Amino acid sequence: MAHESPTFSPLYRQIKSLIVQALEGGDWRPGQAIPSEQDLAMRFGVSQGTVRKAVDELAAENLLVRRQGKGTFVASHDDPRAGVRFLRMTALDGSAAQPQSIPLECWRAKAGQEASRNLAVEPGSPISIVRRLLKLQNKPAVVDEIYLPGEFFGALTLEMLQGWQGSLYSLFETRFGVRMIRAKEKIRAVAADRNSAELLSIAEHTPLLSVERVTYTYGDRPVEWRRGLYSTAEHYYQNELN
């Protein structure tokens, strides 16, 4: 009878997993420097080259940030460059879009079938829902409806959203300790209904991009399901494929 052999994991991948566990456990907070490669090599009992390879992969995945002459830091949503990863709207002239988030509503609800599936929670579980308008260059561009598991975001309020000066993900990271690591998106074309047309200051039935996103934190745990309607009259949706 044939037996399956255990899956082999290169040593640097094992070190990478240990570093991720340390990040998830809060050993080093967002924006904080991690120990040097030499110190990490001593901590894990491996060579500096092995640590460097693990750190290189984590930097490529935007979990860590290398800063020339300063060291390696835990990536943070407070870094202005972090917004570029999750907001892909660019002005037609190629200039970077400067977002302005306008919270409209925030309420608590029970997860329906879609929210349950996308957030990996039981149907009927408590969730928080946020509706907001995103302006780019002072013009309405995106209407978002954002679903969040109540386990993490039960204390979120409209007043908190309105009083926050940074990005939404920066708020989640700073106030709730939830860091958004990666996201999956589905995009299709739709026509603006009356409500979205009013919010985006466009004619009803204008073509829009519907962008549905599930965002994950450490351990591939889904912590956000978002449905956005994007007006591309003055902006386009930009992605980079590697």
Image (cartoon, rainbow, N blue to C red):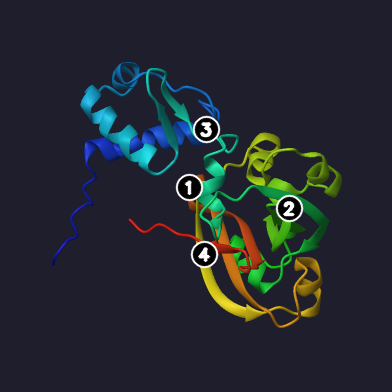
Q: Do the residues labelled 3 and 4 touch (CB within 8 Å)?
A: no
Which one is nearer the viewer's eye here, 233 or 61?
233
**Residue 72 drawn at (x, y percent):** 41, 25
Kind of element beneath mark 1: helix
Badge 2 local density, few (<14 within 10 Å), some, or many (20+)?
A: few
**Residue 196 drawn at (x, y percent):** 76, 72
Q: Report the amino acid beneath label 2.
A: Asn
| Image position of 191 (left or right of 181) | right
Residue at which label 2 appears = 138
Q: Please state which of the two labelled residues, at mark 1 or mark 4, is closer to the viewer.
A: 4
Check residue 219 in the rendering and tell me which mark sits there, or answer none.
1
Residue at which label 4 appears = 185
Q: Which residue is drawn at 21% across and 47% down?
A: 8
- Image quadrant holding the N terminus, namely bottom left
Badge 4 local density, few (<14 within 10 Å), some, or many (20+)?
A: few
Q: Are marks 1 and 2 in contact (CB under 8 Å)?
A: no
